[in-house]
Image (cartoon, rainbow, N blue to C red):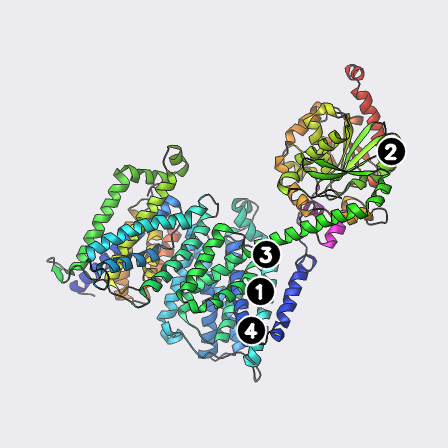
Amino acid sequence: MRYDPPFHRTNGLIPALIALAGLIVLPFVFEASYIRHLLILAFVFGIVAASWDLSLGFGGLFNFAHVALFAVGIYTYAILAKTLGVNPWLAVLAAGPVSVLVATLIALPVLRLDGIYVILVTIAFSQLVYQIIISQSGVTGGTSGMVTLPPLRIGDYRLTSDGRMGYYYVALALLVAACAFLHLLIRSRLGRAIIAMRDAKYLGIARGVPEARTRALTLAASGLFTGLAGGFYASYVRVASPDIFGLGSLTLVLSILLVGGLGTIWGPVMAAFVIILLSEAMSDLGPWRDILIAMLIIAVMVFYPGGLWGVVQEVREAVATTLAGLRARWRRQTGRAAREARMGAPEQMILTRHGRVAVSETGGKGPAILAIHGNSACKEAFCRQFAALRETHRLIAFDLPGHGVSDNADPEEAYNVPAYADVAEDVLAALGIETPVILGWSLGGYVGLELAARAPDRYAGLAITGTAPLNIVPDDFARGYDASSHLVLAGKQYFTSAEQHAYASSATAPLAPDSAFMHRNINRTDGRTRYYMITRLGVVDWPRQMRMLREGSVPFAVLNGADDPFLDHAYIRSLGYGRIWTGAPHDIAQGQHAPFFNRPEAFNLAFTTFMDWARSAARPDVRASA
Amino acid sequence: MMSMDTFMAVATGGLVLGAIYALMAAGLAAVWTTLGIFNFAHGAFIALGAYLGWQIAATQGAGLGLVAGTLGAVLVMFAFGILVHMALVRPFERRADIVTASVITTLAGAAIIESAINLIWGPRSRQMPQLVRGEVDLGLLRIPQSDLVLIVVVACVLAALGWFLGRTRAGRAMRAVSQNRQAAELMGLDVPKLYALAFGISAALAGLAGIFVGGLRFMTPTMGTDPLMKALIVVILGGIARFTSPIYAAFLVGMVESFSNYHVGLYWTPAVLFALMIVVLFLKPSGLFSHHQRTL
């Protein structure tokens, strides 16, 4: 299963376009050609660092000869354009393939090596390239290098004129092309293989990922834009010097990569601006500049390994969380009347162990039903049960923390199934309700199972819908659900508007006037609830739930939609149930993932019949005779 | 065909190079086997050791003579190595990416040390004072006295290191840690202390190597880079199975380099060594002298 939307459908598109537009108009805002010079350097070194990120960050291969690939690009340009008199544009273009070739040569000895040996062999290779360059002084100019290389020009127009305007836009175009190339590569089959070899090498090999070929392609691909950037850089500074092999340029590129964040592509591109500006600002400090940059590298490694990209992610999370919290607060005030009308019940806030949650309760003397909604939904999902059953039952529904109009809560503590069960217990205690029937939907089904497994005697019955009980996690997760993009979205922290729509449509109901409130609700949900819910599956005592079901300590029903697109019905039927209504899971004809909403009449009939059965099943005399 | 005299001169050169590489490689291997990381600041340690020795020994500095300079540099480098371990390696000890992280931080450390040398002593090259001058006639060959001293000192130091690792309690504890960290910890060994000790010994050996390198060539802040590269090839060639395996390899590399310089020329010698390293990596990735379990 794979869910991987193209770039133009991710949340990154708009920020990327804004940044690009900003860079396009920048030369007209700041007219100083020095600023353009710095930006050109930032573009070039951003490309080099982002390409290195491919092998180091994504591939986990420390190719120490990466800067040597850049140098190869520089010297390719110098030799082709100056010595051989090739058209400078062609020389820049040729620098890419030549670097790819050299990168492939580097790859050959390290194909079967691991960890530190990769580092040692590549550093030795880099030294070898250096030695060759300084020894062939007839071709490369030796230690003094080559100067007055031909610049780029279009016809008679020199790219250096108008304050380096031409070079600026060529560099920007190169940066955009490099980013597109790296982004597409990471998303491709090869990119997934590269990441697989880093994260789970032996699993990847067992699944048929060719280790040597992947490694060779990783290094070759990381050489392409590094070489192009080298060729372009040589045409810009018009010097090819072996100084590029020194510790200074290595630490410069490495600091860009680390400050940006490993394994991100965009991080190094952003960090290039910061580091180049910083380095330029410190250019008067002499050796102090190298010391400060090296200290920056150490500080990032020790204190903030996520780098600049990690900061961006934290800011993004803070903004998204705050927005969701503000939406909840706003809607709590403004939409209350509409919600109460929809539910036919007053709404109140109850303080629980995990923050304040919003609760709808019909009151009355009938048997109590506690309804628990699913992932990224809200208590109003049960409005059709409230409408149909409120005369005869006492219905309670609440918004889970981070959902609906409840408060956001501490993600580490509150956004997992046991914590949601804590909240449900607190709501029941606050309302003074004993032995309710629980109706749990999807994620709420797990909350219901958790509640019943904790204290079977306290519940008169448990019905789950859209939930596959699990025994071993995550293995059973793959058995209980059909793999689909919906499943990936269920754990995805940030939704685009298209993803909001897709998730709401598949999880609840297609967008219609009567289901629009659930579509609107998604953007209020704290995205961290999804992420933490999926990543904290391990904190649940799943075997205890399964034991409770096998022993039949609570009257139980499975009321799934027959057409639920996510559940594996065969898996759910294969489980052992000690005391289940109708003896097997009951399917609601034409029901979807939320059958109580799609097919309320059939669902309510089944649910009330189950409750009658559960009440009789709960009577000691009936149980004894059974 | 080369004459006997030339042959002996080239061989002596190889022996001297081999002795220096052996010092460096033993230091690198001490850290590599115990901590499992490669210390890229080792080359900078060499430079720092040389400059410290110069500061104490040279008449422009304290003028205390080369013996005092050597002892002082080795002692200071020992302490400095422990300091570097605390600052650059300890923070990552429990992290999965310790190899990459420590490569990056030690590299940054090397940049800091080199720049600091540049700041303190300036980029101008300097000459280490000589302890002895003249040549000594050993019948078959005449070699410079300083080379003889170098070879004898290195032999004594390596023998002492071998005795330390094989016979003393601390040395055996270090070997135990390099074989199995967890078991060593469970036996009550103070692993962080032993790691620091390994780093200290490594830096002290680098300091001594620096004094010798400074005596052979001019001293510059980047003087450690080339020996580090050679020591790196040595360690790959020899493997780190035992503390002696990089030493054999060091003399092998020293000889190859010396003869290759004579026959192939200065410029292509790195390529010859690199080719040798690649061939060994293909045929025997764990090193030429590696049929034992790694024990330091």
Res A266 → quadrant? bottom right
Marks 4 and 2 share the same chain: yes
Could you tell me how far apart the alpha carbons at marks 4 and 3 are, in whole angstroms?
Answer: 30 Å
Badge 1: few (under 14), some or many (20 or more) residues near its Cα, within 10 Å?
many
Task: Name the N-terminal-most of marks 3 and 2.
Answer: 3
Reading the image, the residue beneath label 3 is A186
Majority secondary structure of the magenta segment? Answer: helix
Residue in the foreground of this view, choosing between A482 and B59: B59
Reading the image, the residue beneath label 4 is A36
Could you tell me how far apart the alpha carbons at marks 1 and 4 are, in whole angstroms?
Answer: 19 Å
Determine the secondary structure under disc 3. Answer: helix
Could you tell me how far apart the alpha carbons at marks 3 and 2 are, in whole angstroms?
Answer: 54 Å
Q: Nearer the viewer, mark 3 or mark 2?
A: 2
Task: Name the N-terminal-most of marks 1 and 4.
Answer: 4
Marks 3 and 2 share the same chain: yes
Task: Name the N-terminal-most of marks 4 and 2.
Answer: 4
The answer to whether residue A167 shows anywhere in this view is yes
Q: Which residues are magenta?
A: A481-505
Chain for numbered disc 1: A
Residue B188 position (above or below residue B281): above
Q: Nearer the viewer, mark 2 or mark 1?
A: 2
Q: Nearer the viewer, mark 1 or mark 4?
A: 4
Residue A348 percent across, percent down from the top left: 79, 38
Residue A45 position (above or below residue A192): below
Reading the image, the residue beneath label 2 is A390
Residue A248 percent across, percent down from the top left: 42, 64
Q: Is residue A489 magenta?
A: yes
Inspect the image, locate mark 1, and give the three-letter code of the amino acid beneath it.
Ala
Reading the image, the residue beneath label 1 is A178
Marks 1 and 3 share the same chain: yes
